[in-house]
Amino acid sequence: MQNEFTAVIKSFDELTLTELEEIYRLRVSVFVVEQNCPYQEIDGLDSHAIHIMLRDKDGITAYCRVLDRTNPFGEVAIGRVIAVKRRLGYGTKVVRLGIETAIEYYNTDKIVLEAQTYARGLYEKCGFVQTSDVFLEDGIPHIMMQWTKTEDRG
């Protein structure tokens, strides 16, 4: 049974120092340490992002950030998607909340992301479609994906 969670949506300036430390610790532990991928995880884009956390009694259980159009993709983008407790639906919930947040904050009908290939199914479940061939990003296979607003989904 899944724990109860609270959704927290904040701009960078609204984050407390404790929240920011928790986010950075989580992202580094997954994207750098767990995936054995030394790269510049803190990339300078966080200050232009909306940060979305699903929190339960243990802390952050899922996270993503939504970037405005000033990011390197030139489109509203979702990134740094993490589900701490895996295979429980938290990843899907945080991505769907990311889509809603992108629409609300940036009035967009298109969202892009770079997905690790193993996670393609998660993003497809949320309405994203693959838009590129597989490429290596920091030695890990990725694909570009895009979500487009349609009349039957918002």
Image (cartoon, helix red, strand yellow):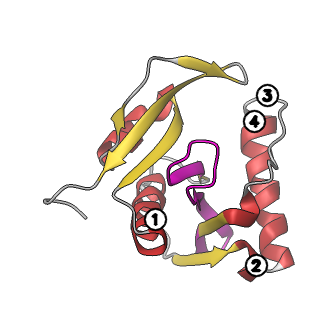
Identify the mark at residue 102; answer none if there is no mark: 1
Q: Residue 121 appears at what percent x and percent y?
A: 37, 36
Q: State yes or no: discs 4 and 2 in contact (Cβ < 8 Å).
A: no
- Amino acid under label 3? Asn
Which region shows up in magenta? Answer: 53-81
Q: How far apart are marks 1 and 4 (CA)?
A: 28 Å
Which residue bears the numbered disc 4? 34
Q: In this view, does 63 lie to the left or right of 124?
A: right
Q: Nearer the N terminus, badge 1 or badge 4?
A: 4
Q: Distance between the residues labelled 2 and 1?
A: 17 Å
Can residue 64 be seen in the rendering of this structure? yes
Identify the mark at residue 36; answer none if there is no mark: 3
Which residue bears the numbered disc 2? 13
Q: Residue 112 appears at what percent x and percent y?
A: 46, 44
Q: In which quarter of the image is the C terminus?
A: bottom left
Front residue (pair 77, 119): 77
Front residue (pair 10, 29): 10
Q: Distance between the residues labelled 2 and 3?
A: 30 Å
In the image, which is nearer the foreground, mark 2 or mark 3?
2
Can residue 1 be seen in the rendering of this structure? no
- Amino acid under label 4? Glu
* SS category of the residue bearing label 4: helix
Q: State yes or no: discs 4 and 3 in contact (Cβ < 8 Å).
A: yes
- Amino acid under label 1? Ala
